Amino acid sequence: MAGRTVKLSLLIIATILIALASLFIGSTDIAPMAALKAMFGQGEEAHILILQQLRLPRTLLGLAIGAGLGASGAALQGYSRNPLADPGVLGFSACAALGAVAALYFGLRTYVPLFALIGAGLGATLLVALVGQRQRASVLILAGVGLGALATAVTGLIMNFAPNPWALSEIVYWMMGSLREAGPSALIYCLPLTAAGLIALFITAPDLRTLALGEDTAQSLGVSLPRLQILLVSGVALCVGSGVAVAGAIGFVGLFIPHILRALIGADPARLVPYSALAGAGFLVLADMATRAISSNGATLYLGILTSLIGVPFFLWLATRKMSS
């Protein structure tokens, strides 16, 4: 128990330090005391503008999206009993991206977050309707993969008929994923929905621990599989949909964060889900700091590209290891 407390404390401290570093470090370095004053509206006007309008919303958004992706990945891996599961496997990120791309295609740039959330919500509704009373994890995963493939195909069709190169480039850049447009409006969309999604996923964690014994055994021990499935689908849809709505597609965070923590704290979903939320939050803010550092030298590196460059080799290593075991 003491060891778990120490690990949790270290994870919390690391996440807080990363978040603070994100406020202090950037293209314009601000001393820690000046940054703290600026957060409360004191000090130089330029520092106040940078902290309150740019860095603080960006950091909060990174923490929220990373927490949602990390917890979603851990919950899905616990539900499917497969370490290769990822939040994108249920198709919600593809559905949210389809909604956002549709908004961009029709020139409704202001309504991109709203359309993305509608897309994720429709995807969750359709997935539940497709699965119906079949409560097996394999059925849910297969339906989600099919739904994601359909949404991706329709997204490609929309991009194929983009009215001009500028509209196509806007769609492509948005799909790369970035926190560059973080602001108060993005936080209004993302924070409440991600919080609701995290609560739903945290509620599933004890049932996921029992589910590790098998679906029939879990039912005999009092786990309601329909309730568990609804909570899981709702939680993942809220976390992933709200993240895609304001930052575009950011992948692989939910794949490797839970797997790394599994090696450190064990595979118990009751602990892995909240731990993955913390680690995912810290990792995404750290990755965003890296993109800012690289982009400040003239080249633009998108956050979704960086997480994929980190996640794809890890996924290939994990898949190869699983096949050889």
Image (tube, rainbow, N blue to C red):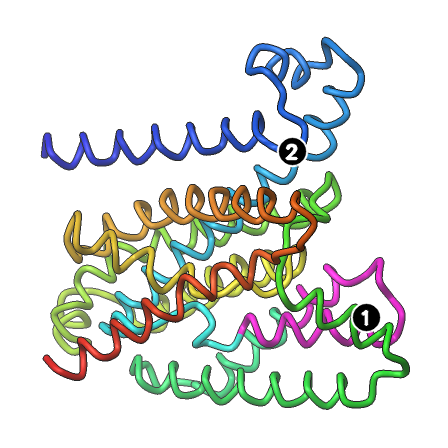
Residue ID at (76%, 85%) = 158
Report the side of 11 relative to 308 (left or right): left
Location of residue 295 with respect to 7 vertically, above or below: below
- Mark 1 lies on a secondary structure that is helix
Q: Which residue is mark 2?
A: 55
Image quadrant in which the N terminus is located = top left
Neighbourhood count class around disc 2 (C-alpha, 10 Å): few under 14, some 14–19, many 20 upward: many
Magenta-colored segment: predominant secondary structure: helix
Residue ID at (82%, 89%) = 161
Range shown magenta: 92-119
- Residue 113 at what x, y percent from top left? 72, 59
Question: Which residue is at the front of the view, 189 or 54?
Answer: 54
Amino acid type at circle 2 is Arg
Report the side of 306 relative to 212 (left or right): right
On whether residue 124 falls in the magenta region, the answer is no
Question: Which residue is at the front of the view, 287 or 28?
Answer: 28
Q: Which mark is residue 11?
A: none
Q: Which residue is mark 1?
A: 104
Residue 300, quarter of the rendered image? bottom right
Amino acid type at circle 1 is Leu
Location of residue 77 with respect to 123 vertically, above or below: above
For marks 1 and 2 on the same chain, the one whose residue lies earlier in the sequence: 2
Location of residue 292 with respect to 11 vertically, above or below: below
